[in-house]
C-alpha cells in the first residue's frame, strides 16, 4: 500500500497554493499512486511527489508532465 502524502506546511503563499492545486488535481484523477503517475509522466516518483510537496517550485516540464498524467488541462 502506498504511503500517504505528508501534510503541507502551515501558512499560505503561492508555492503552497500551487502544491495544493497539484494535490487537488491528483485527487480528482482518483488519487493514483505516484508510481503509476511516474510511468505515465516519464519522471521519477520522487520528482513528482516533490512537485506537490510545497517545498520548492517544480520545473515547467515536471509540472506539465504531472498535470498530463492526471488528465488535467495542460
Image: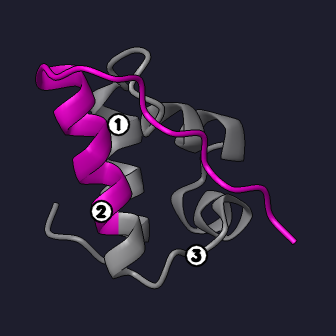
Q: What residue is at 30 percent from the left and 62 percent from the top?
A: 24
Which numbered tag is attached to residue 24?
Answer: 2
Mark 2 surroundings within 10 Å by alpha-carbon count, few (fewer than 14), some (14 through 19), many (20 or more): some
Q: Say which of 61 and 9 sits in front.
A: 9
Q: Is residue 68 left or right of residue 37?
A: left
Q: Which residues are magenta?
A: 1-25
Q: CA distance from mark 1 to mark 2?
A: 19 Å
Label 1 secondary element? helix
Q: Is residue 10 left or right of residue 4?
A: left
List x then y, in percent, for residue 68: 33, 65
Q: What residue is at 67 percent from the left and 70 percent from the top?
A: 36
In the image, residue 16 sits, relative to residue 26, either above or below, namely above
Which numbered tag is attached to residue 32?
Answer: 3
Q: CA distance from mark 3 to mark 2?
A: 12 Å
Dot 1 or dot 2, earlier in sequence = 2
List x then y, in percent, for residue 8: 43, 33
Q: How many marks?
A: 3
Label 3 secondary element? loop
Label 2 secondary element? helix
Which numbered tag is attached to residue 61?
Answer: 1
Q: Quadrant of residue 25?
A: bottom left
Q: Say which of 10 and 2 sits in front.
A: 10
Report the quarter where the C terminus lies: bottom left
Amino acid at each position: 500500500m502506498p504511503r500517504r502524502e505528508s501534510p503541507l506546511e502551515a501558512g499560505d503563499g503561492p508555492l503552497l497554493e500551487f502544491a495544493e492545486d497539484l494535490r487537488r488535481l491528483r485527487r480528482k484523477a482518483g488519487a493514483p499512486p505516484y508510481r503509476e503517475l511516474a510511468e505515465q509522466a516519464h519522471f521519477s516518483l520522487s520528482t513528482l511527489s516533490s512537485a506537490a510537496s510545497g517545498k520548492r517550485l517544480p520545473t515547467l516540464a515536471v509540472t506539465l508532465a504531472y498535470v498530463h498524467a492526471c488528465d488535467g488541462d495542460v
